[in-house]
Amino acid sequence: MLHPDIKEVLYSEEEISAVVKDLGAQLTKEYEGKNPLVIGVLKGAVMFMTDLSRAMNCDLELDFMDVSSYGAGMESSGDVKILKDLDTTVDGRDLLIVEDIIDTGRTLSYLIEIFKYRKAKSIKVVTLMDKKERRVVDLEADYIGINVPNEFVVGYGLDFNEKYRNLPYIGILKTEVYE
Ligand SMILES: O=P(O)(O)OC[C@H]1O[C@H](OP(=O)(O)OP(=O)(O)O)[C@H](O)[C@@H]1O
Ligand code: HPA
């Protein structure tokens, strides 16, 4: 049943699943014979990462990083700070950064700089959604699931004030919820 705060479903559970399977097949080819470190960016990417990694038919390791962009609600301030670092050393490793959404690009550009500095062998980015219209930093993901319009979306990991992450679909909130 549709959550009462949701105005419209943009991507159904079935549509998301098809996109994830397709990305998984592409990444299986990319990492054949390698052992990438798959890095989930907390918390939004968790649902995508667990589904995507099961669609990747190759050896891999999982780790997590949590960064904050110093903002609550819908806007980030632009400053990025590490809240939880990786447990794994990235020196010489093939890294796959998993994002749920790229918006301004600030989070990702910060992570890429850190992993370059830490001497990763290769860095690729997969994002479920790309909101290109909002980009501030010039940056492109290597693998993109869905190009989304400039709307604030929730569900399948994405929140508004920590709510709605557990919705199995991706949708748009009714305006009265955040006004
Ligand atoms: O391209 P950007 O403008 O940097 O925005 C993208 C980032 O913002 C969201 O995370 P958020 O900081 O909301 O944390 P969360 O994943 O814990 O919800 C999202 O999961 C990305 O990590
Ligand atoms: O559209 C969004 N929804 C939730 N979190 C986000 N972080 C960046 N863009 C979004």
Image: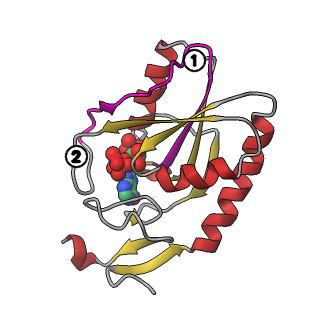
Q: Is residue 162 left or right of residue 168?
A: left
Residue 131 seen in this snapshot: no
Q: Earlier in the sequence, mark 1 or mark 2?
A: 2
Query: Where is ligand 2, by quadrant?
Result: bottom left
Quadrant of image for the N terminus:
bottom left
Judging from the image, what secondary structure is the residue with disc 1 in?
Answer: loop
The answer to whether 68 appears left or right of 55 in the picture is left
Residue 51, image x and y in percent?
61, 55
Which residue is nearer to you in this view: 143 or 162? 162
Indicate the quadrant where residue 73 lies. Answer: bottom left
Magenta run includes residue 146? no
The residue type indicated by label 1 comes to Ala
Give the residue type at disc 2: Gly
Q: Which x, y percent locates residue 65?
A: 41, 35
> Residue at (38%, 81%) from the top-left corner?
3
Q: Write down the region rendered in magenta.
A: 77-101
Decide which of 152, 99 is in the foreground and name it. Answer: 99
**Residue that badge 2 annotates:** 71
Residue at 64% from the left image edge and 38% from the top image edge? 142
Quarter of the view holding residue 159: bottom left
Crowdedness of circle 2 by 10 Å Cα count: few (<14), some, many (20+)?
Answer: few
Residue in view at x 34 percent, y 36 percent = 67
Crowdedness near tag 1: few (<14), some (14–19) or many (≥20) residues, C-alpha within 10 Å: some
Q: How many marks?
A: 2
Q: Is mark 2 within 8 Å of ligand 1?
A: yes
- Whether the magenta-drawn stretch holds residue 95 is answered as yes
Secondary structure beneath disc 2? loop
The C terminus - image quarter? bottom left
Which residue is the site of mark 1?
A: 120
